[in-house]
Amino acid sequence: MWSMGSLAVVLFSGGIDSTTTLAMAIALDYRPIVLSFDYGQKHRLEIEKGKSVLRQFQIDTHMIFPIDLTLIGGSALTSAMPVPKFRNIDSSIPVTYVPGRNLIFLSVAAAIGEVRGAFDLFYGANVLDYSGYPDCRPEFIAALERTLEAGTKSGTEGRSFKIHAPLLKMTKAEIILKGLELGVDYSNTHSCYDPSADGTACGACDSCLLRQKGFEEAGVKDPAVYSRQGAP
Amino acid sequence: MWSMGSLAVVLFSGGIDSTTTLAMAIALDYRPIVLSFDYGQKHRLEIEKGKSVLRQFQIDTHMIFPIDLTLIGGSALTSAMPVPKFRNIDSSIPVTYVPGRNLIFLSVAAAIGEVRGAFDLFYGANVLDYSGYPDCRPEFIAALERTLEAGTKSGTEGRSFKIHAPLLKMTKAEIILKGLELGVDYSNTHSCYDPSADGTACGACDSCLLRQKGFEEAGVKDPAVYSRQGAP
């Protein structure tokens, strides 16, 4: 009998982390329902760029869910507040934190999963080379799993959601090496929070800095095109 | 010095429960940020009807957040699936359950609260005269509070969200009597899941049946207009 893997909902932004997570879900034989959000982000072009990642993986089911988080604001990614450049990335939570975003995204993913029978959710959070976002931490993920168990029909019927965060304890360099091992072409990924109109990365936001550091530590050339390189 | 209550985000559908919850929040001296959702519900007119409730309370800050849950489906409220009529309301979860809805709504409420400095969220869930929805139960609310503590900036900084569900253990009759005591005019509220185009309630969906039972038990005349009354 021909076997098929289980369905899984994969949160996908088109960046390094979610692209690698997607590759890992596929390697684990899950059939991915790829879910992206058009949420009013400044770097909305990540959605378009993400399509080339999906073409590489021959995935044609891509759900782009619209939710206008600019109505909520409070973040440099969804309001006129400028994206910080060459910030010293420490343990503080930066203004690129988007209130409620990952909770809302994972809630939508669970809702889709419940309707489609996909109780495995993949989420590319990591807590080593990251920007200090609270909604990337393991205690958040564990609490949300408990919430889904208590608050969904399937949870009360004994079908619990599992939130897989396979990158959680990996460095960016390890993530990149893992992705390369799985055949990811990182030239298709987009990381920059504040790209120019033609899609060139700024090279100075947290996301660019973490990406550059990751490729450097991995000893691999970063295929991204930057408008400027290095510290100011 | 003139004192003002704290800001609170109040989830508001325009029905009996959320209207009474709003009245209770105001009686507790909270300044409400009233939040409704335009989510593709069949009974979208609840949003319009809700405006007369807000006029009665002289509230002019009403946020109507759009999120298209018909893209997810899986519910009689957001798809072509018919709304059940004269159902025997038992402990099973009916097809009017909307996967993820209340989790998504409360997540958006918390995000708005975090940006606006409102750490009190009001939610009209109750578990006595209700349709068996898992996302109305106290264990869901407790788990979500923990999730917000772990996954928000304010939570990690020691400002925890409190989800107030003052109706949780009240019968529908008690809710109605409480609202009347606080001056609620229930002729402004809308309950029906499946109203006719002119807004007349069907009198047969779970929501109509629970409403009718509540008014009957409270010994108060229900001001709603129904297209039919009683069992078929």
Image (spheres, coloured by chain):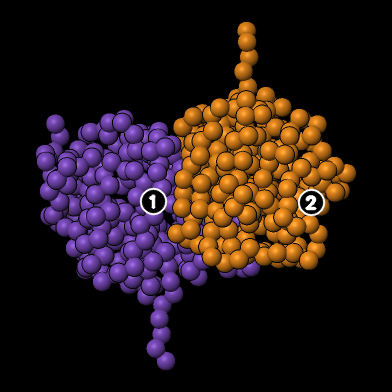
Chain colours: A orange, B purple
- Point out the frontmost of discs 1 and 2: 2
Task: Give the residue at x 39% y 88%.
Answer: B2
Quarter placement of the N terminus of chain B: bottom left
Whether residue A196 is situated above or below residue B81 in the rendered picture: below
Disc 1 from disc 2: Cα separation: 37 Å
Q: How crowded is mark 1: few (under 14 residues within 10 Å), some or many (20 or more)?
A: some
Identify whether B70 is placed above or below A69: above
From where the camera sits, is residue B66 visible? yes
Which residue is depicted at the point 28% across and 41% down? B42
Image quadrant where residue A75 sits: bottom right
- Residue that numbered label 1 is attached to: B66
Occupied quadrant, residue B73 = top left
Measured as percent of width and height from the top left, residue B183 is found at 21, 68
Chain bearing tag 2 is A
Q: What element carries label 2?
A: helix
Where residue A159 appears, as percent x and y from the top left, is: 54, 32
Q: Residue A170: where, in percent of width, then height? A: 79, 45
Amino acid type of the residue that numbered disc 1 sits on in the rendered structure: Pro
- The residue nearer to you, when weighing B16 against B38, is B38
Q: Residue A212 carries which label?
A: 2
Compared to residue B8, the image places residue B139 above or below, namely above
